[in-house]
Image: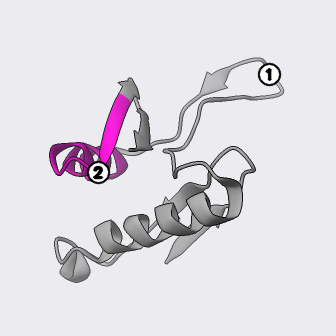
Amino acid sequence: MFVVFEDKNGWIVRNALLPEYLQKNNIATNFYIKMNELSRKKTGKPLKSSQPRKLYSGQIVHELSNLGIKLWESLVKKGLAKKISHKNYVFI
């Protein structure tokens, strides 16, 4: 299951949940590549990782999971994305 936030400044995959037996089959990678294409087509901007947000309490949270970081790092290694800062990535 994937949930995509269609932000005007570039789409964000908010949730990417695959059963363990489906992981490491390039399903998520291919999905991210397709969402990047659609984000560029609709907004003119690339797909990006989830961004930090401020709660009503004032606390800043960044909800990119360890599996999400691993996926983005694999996209960086493949030359598809770049790391901007901790937990912050964008497609090239």
Residue at 75% across, 50% down: 8
Q: Say whether disc 1 or disc 2 marks the residue closer to the N-terminus.
A: 1
Residue stretch rendered in magenta on the structure: 68-83
Please indicate whether residue 28 sits to the left or right of residue 20 in the image: right
**Would you place residue 58 above or below residue 80 in this image?**
above
Residue 82 inside the magenta-drawn segment: yes
Answer with the quarter of the image where residue 64 lies: top left
Q: Position of residue 65 (x, y in %)?
A: 40, 45
Q: Which class describes the residues within 10 Å of circle 2: few (<14), some (14-19), or many (20+)?
A: some
Q: Which class describes the residues within 10 Å of circle 1: few (<14), some (14-19), or many (20+)?
A: few
Return the mark for residue 80: 2
Q: Residue furthest right?
A: 56
Q: Nearer the viewer, mark 1 or mark 2?
A: 2
Residue at 31% across, 78% down: 19
Residue 6 visible in the picture? no
Name the residue carrying label 1: 57
Residue 3 inside the magenta-drawn segment: no
